[in-house]
Image (spheres, helix red, strand yellow):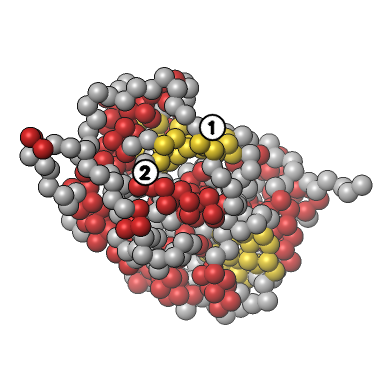
Amino acid sequence: MTTEITFSSLALAEPILRAIADAGYITPTPIQAQAIPQVLAGGDLLAAAQTGTGKTAGFTLPILHHLSTRAAQAPRPGRPRCLILVPTRELAAQVEESVKTYGKYLSLTSMVMFGGVNINPQFKALKSRVDILVATPGRLLDHMGQKTVDLSGVEILVLDEADRMLDMGFIRDIKKVLAVLPKQRQNLLFSATFSDEIRTLANGLLHNPKSIEVARRNTTVEIIEQSMYRVPQAHKRDLLAHLIRHHDWQQVLVFTRTKHGANKLAEKLNKDGITAAAIHGNKSQSARTKALASFKDGSVRVLVATDIAARGIDIDQLPQVVNFELPNVPEDYVHRIGRTGRAGTTGSALSLVDDEEISYLRDIEKLIKRSIVRVEVEGFTPPAKADLMSDERPPRPPHGRGGRGQGQNNGQRQNSGQRGPQSGNRNAPGRAAQGQAAAGAGGAKPAPPRAAQPRKPRPQAALFSAKPGSRGH
């Protein structure tokens, strides 16, 4: 009979165990049970697990132990001992919150650094001691350029959500950071997936790493109930409002493909008497923080988000996720629905699928190696006059099936607030945003009133130029 692993059996320092107990945890998740001993041993680590399985604590706990039990070498202001790189603002805030939660009985200090906010408070914080720095790559490069941060004392480097950072085009920024770090350090690479690109990055970064993969590649959490409705794009807004009322959903996270679509959907729901807020890269950081806080405390019933927020939203016992539009990249489906069914709780993920999204659906089912259950809508009657304007159609990916061409990388990066106070420049939305706007405007001219007819669906084959499973890089 095997002995159950507990946090107290993982040789963590007593103040850390006390903080874990305060948070109500006793038994580590599989990724934590495997990763913590490996990190404590001091070697490099490549770890992958499904979203919602506790990867953050899998590296923050042993890092806190390491830093608290070993004296710092030449400590001085603005010289962190641990650097944690993450792709988005929300994830940066989430990781630093985890550091504070588990390190509250330690004398260690931490700070979070990202763009889209005033840089001056960060300058001030770096004039004091900082043991753990959680940062997005672009804003970190801003500080490096102004010589306000000293990375020569980094003992541990963490790349969290490394697959997302590659998708968002941060590889050059990461390499610039790596170039100034000490050669002797511990490297930890955590990712939701083990793509071929991640393995290439790991081969160049890690030295004789241990490898942990607690679930097969790109699986979805099994306890999440996944289903889909076939519905024309023009009816989706009304259907979503109907479903929220019919099922009395009190907290639902909805994903759209574009920022414009997120705004329009939130406006529609509010007009229908359902409190909703949108969160995406064009929103200021204060607006994003306020929307997320309102969603968490229940004052906002629906949070409409784009994929850039998919990795940074961590809500306990979130019951419902809706894909208002399927993502262009199948892996993003895994990350989206991973916002529910976290840490062993149950959850439900529903997708609204237009005819033009069927190929996206097939790619997703191929990736997760299961069929998503088709369900019928009960009690829903579409409006008598459906709005079939072209801005209701899912936009085509700007570069092949994946939609991950250089234009989209640029657009995501600008809108994620990574590059200092100029990030999120409304006057320079990037080619991806322009492409989305063009898709929203629609290339076809409206027919004269006497010949008005619903537009015929485009051939599905026209949506793709790459083989299924490619990432469009």
Q: Residue 49's image quarter?
A: bottom right
Q: Which mark is residue 302?
A: none
Crowding near pointer 1: few (<14 within 10 Å), some, many (20+)? many
Q: Amino acid at mark 1?
A: Pro
User: Which residue sits at x=23%, y=51%?
Assistant: 439
Q: In the rendered image, is residue 75 in sight?
A: no
Rendered position, 464 above or below 20: below
335 relative to 381 in the view: left or right: right
Rendered position, 389 above or below 310: above
Along the line of sight, which residue is nearer the eye, 287 or 223?
223
- The residue under label 1 is 319
22 relative to 117 in the view: left or right: right
Q: Residue 265's image quarter?
A: top left
Secondary structure of the residue carrying tag 1 is: loop
Give the image location of residue 310, x and y in percent: 45, 48
- The residue under label 2 is 355
User: Which residue sits at x=72%, y=47%?
Assistant: 28
Along the line of sight, which residue is nearer the eye, 381 or 178?
381
Secondary structure of the residue carrying tag 2 is: helix
Q: Residue furthest front?
A: 451
Along the line of sight, which residue is nearer the eye, 2 or 152?
2
Q: In the rendered image, is residue 242 in sight?
A: yes
Rendered position, 348 above or below 171: above
